[in-house]
Image: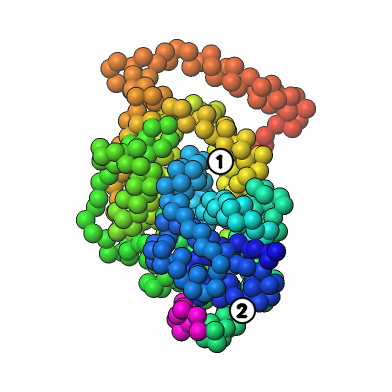
């Protein structure tokens, strides 16, 4: 019986060539698996037919846009996921859903191996392979570029020699990965970290230096999930898509960082995530209104750890699942509206309201109607500062008190 290998298939040159390349190298039948996570481009049926025309024995295609938005983007939003305080895990959160469908295809067609198009230098090889073995430990993984020496030059030569129905002349100078949550651009002249990104790098965002008139938007949340925009009900996918369009028109969500990759190298990355960054900004502000102080402080730590784990390919790990449970519990009262002005590269919060918030006007006001008992403050300060007071008294008694004249002596 001929071995079967499921290939993560994009419809482009490299993965189209990989179908025949894998078959020639291993003798296995190749099943192409294409997953739509909102990356745009060609219709899934066009991609399916191309895979078959390039030699795949079967083609599995899945429209996973709503699945991706609901089950992957929304957990990232609830965690306020920003790797290195900047990157909203655009590629990292798409790998688990793609992997899930690769494994589904492998089980459906009885494949023993899953193949992906990653190189040996990037994060995605880890994300794919750790996720695959987490879902199906019996499956093997190969990477044609890494394991079978499939370079781009060899891909072009192979496609032309075999007459494959795929364009071989266009070569984008950048490596690009995109989905509905955002777009990642790397390589080419961006590898010199002194070079400024040029206009042709960007696609999801317009130039923030020349914005249209300011755009006011009200985003409504229920338990941490956007449910309406300007009073009109939306699904998570629709919320991301609309804010990609509106925030993108204002140049919001451009990110340019030198990033610490999982494999140990630093890499210059440019991202566009207008919808994601707008939603995260709004969600963070609503949490400031609705989360209790200690809960909010601890959630920031949990969110950072969640983000690192997802970036490092641990979506299906036991700890990630436990962190999910904590984060989900914190979202119980994250309900309400955030008003924002989108303009010139910035998403600025201008208003917030919540029926389940902890902001109490009568406690906060300094005007008539103040219900805060200011007489309680003195006793609170005495108790709060007691430990520091005792420690300071010991320092003074032992001659180790603060030198109040040190600054004058240095002068």
Per the image, the residue denoted by label 1 is 303
Q: Which residue lies furthest to the left in this view?
A: 213
Q: Residue 82, image x and y in percent?
A: 52, 49
Task: Provide the residue span drawn in magenta.
Answer: 163-176
Q: CA separation, marks 1 and 2?
A: 38 Å
Residue in the image at 34% along x and 47% along y:
238
Looking at marks 1 and 2 on the same chain, the residue that comes earlier in the sequence is marked by: 2
Q: How is the image coloured?
A: rainbow
Q: Residue 240, image x and y in percent?
A: 37, 49
Q: Within the magenta stretch, is there residue 220?
A: no
Q: Residues within 10 Å of mark 2 (few under 14, many from 20)?
A: few
Indicate left or right for 230 with 26 as reference: left
Q: Residue 90, image x and y in percent?
A: 49, 55
Residue in the image at 27% along x and 60% along y:
211
Per the image, the residue denoted by label 2 is 151
Residue in the image at 62% along x and 76% along y:
21
Query: Which residue is more in the foreground, 167 or 61?
Result: 61
Q: Is 401 placed above or below 17 here?
A: above
Q: Within the magenta stretch, is there residue 174?
A: yes
Query: Which residue is more in the foreground, 368 or 87?
Result: 87
Q: How crowded is mark 1: few (under 14 residues within 10 Å), some or many (20 or more)?
A: many
Q: In which image quadrant can residue 261 be found?
A: bottom right
């Amino acid at each position: 019986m001929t071995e079967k290998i499921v290939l993560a298939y994009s419809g482009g040159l490299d993965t189209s060539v990989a179908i025949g390349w894998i078959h020639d190298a291993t003798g296995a039948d190749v099943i192409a698996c294409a997953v739509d996570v909102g990356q745009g481009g060609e219709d899934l049926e066009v991609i399916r037919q191309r895979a078959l025309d390039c030699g795949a024995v079967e083609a599995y295609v899945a429209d996973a846009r709503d699945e991706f938005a609901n089950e992957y983007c929304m957990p990232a939003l609830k965690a306020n996921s920003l790797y290195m305080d900047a990157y909203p895990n655009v590629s990292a959160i798409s790998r688990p859903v793609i992997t899930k469908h690769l494994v589904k295809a492998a089980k459906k067609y009885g494949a023993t191996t899953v193949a992906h198009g990653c190189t040996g230098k990037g994060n995605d090889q880890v994300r794919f392979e750790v996720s695959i073995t987490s879902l199906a430990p019996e499956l093997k993984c190969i990477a044609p570029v890494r394991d079978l020496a499939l370079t781009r030059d060899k891909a072009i030569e192979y496609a032309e020699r075999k007459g494959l129905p795929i364009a071989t002349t266009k070569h984008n100078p950048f490596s690009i990965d995109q989905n509905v949550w955002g777009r990642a651009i790397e390589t080419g002249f961006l590898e010199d970290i002194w070079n400024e990104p040029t206009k042709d790098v960007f696609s999801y965002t317009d130039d923030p230096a020349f914005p249209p008139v300011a755009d006011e938007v009200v985003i409504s949340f229920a338990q941490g999930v956007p449910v309406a925009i300007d009073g009109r009900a939306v699904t998570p996918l629709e919320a991301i898509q609309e804010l990609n369009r509106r925030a993108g028109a204002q140049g919001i969500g451009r990110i340019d960082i030198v990033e610490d990759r999982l494999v140990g190298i630093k890499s210059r990355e440019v991202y566009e995530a207008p919808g994601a960054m707008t939603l995260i900004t709004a969600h963070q502000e609503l949490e400031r209104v609705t989360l209790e102080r200690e809960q909010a402080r601890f959630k920031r730590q949990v969110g950072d750890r969640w983000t690192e784990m997802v970036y490092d390919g641990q979506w299906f790990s036991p700890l990630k699942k436990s962190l999910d449970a904590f984060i989900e519990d914190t979202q119980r009262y994250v309900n309400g509206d955030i008003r924002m002005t989108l303009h010139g590269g910035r998403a600025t919060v201008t208003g917030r309201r919540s029926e389940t918030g902890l902001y109490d006007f009568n406690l906060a006001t300094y005007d008539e109607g103040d219900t805060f008992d200011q007489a309680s403050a003195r006793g609170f300060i005495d108790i709060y500062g007691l430990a520091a007071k005792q420690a300071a008294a010991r320092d003074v008694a032992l001659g180790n008190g603060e030198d109040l004249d040190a600054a004058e002596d240095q002068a």
